[in-house]
Image: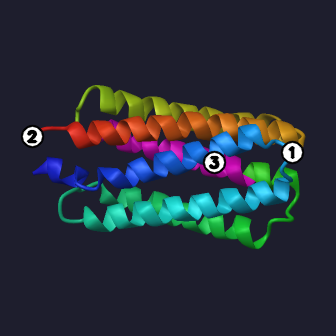
Amino acid sequence: MEINIYKNWWLLTIKGLLVTLFGIAALFFPGVTLATLMIYFGILIIVSGVFLLVGAFSHVKDNKHWANWLFEGLLDIIIGIVIVIYPQLTVDLFIIIVGIWAVTIGFTELFSALNAHKSGQARWLMLLNAVIVVVFGIVLFINPTETSAALTMLVGIFAVIFGVIVTIYSFNLRNLKA
């Protein structure tokens, strides 16, 4: 039964809460150097990717779209490792990497939302989140030379919005009834 794919809704809850906490930290501590921010962001993406891989492999039998989670998880881990290993990359390169990640993940989430269980509010939240992620990625491409403080604030705002939406979406998955 398709509802079985949502048995690990709590993985998305953890991801959403971690991203929200990261965003709050970025907003309240904008003086943090960009290299430190990159390392934290890379670690966050790696952890997010691991959660998505666990979710993908636990849904192989129940969900024909489990590969979307697998793809997003692998992409998160690869980009996260690159960011952690090379924290001294230029700000522009970091912004472009984050922009590529955001646009790619946004389109992956958009595809997933369009193929998701027709559950009303949960589906629309996933669609809204996908659009926000794509727009965030495009904004990064338009002006990659922002100062580190402005980038920290932008990433913080994005992370809080993204984290809250993912957390709400995860609770909607928990509440789905067959």
Q: Quadrant of residue 117?
A: top left
Q: Are marks 1 and 3 in contact (CB under 8 Å)?
A: no
Residue 50 higher or lower than 2, as above or below: below
Query: Is residue 106 shown in magenta?
Result: yes
Disc number lying in front (2 or 1)? 1
Q: Is residue 5 left or right of residue 95?
A: left
- Residue stretch in magenta: 97-115
The mark found on residue 31 in the picture is 1
Query: Is residue 110 shown in magenta?
Result: yes
Q: Residues within 10 Å of mark 2 (few under 14, many from 20)?
A: few
Q: Earlier in the sequence, mark 2 or mark 1?
A: 1
Q: Is residue 5 left or right of residue 154?
A: left
Q: Are marks 2 and 3 in contact (CB under 8 Å)?
A: no
Image position, residue 149 (x, y; %): 86, 40
The answer to whether residue 141 is seen in the rendering is: no
At label 2, the amino acid type is: Ala
At label 1, the amino acid type is: Gly
The answer to whether residue 58 is seen in the rendering is: yes
Q: CA distance from mark 2 to mark 3?
A: 34 Å
The mark found on residue 22 in the picture is 3
Q: Residues within 10 Å of mark 1 (few under 14, many from 20)?
A: few
Which residue is tagged 2?
A: 178
Q: Residues within 10 Å of mark 3 (few under 14, many from 20)?
A: many
Residue under the image location 34 percent in, 62 percent down: 56
For the rendered model, the colour scheme is rainbow
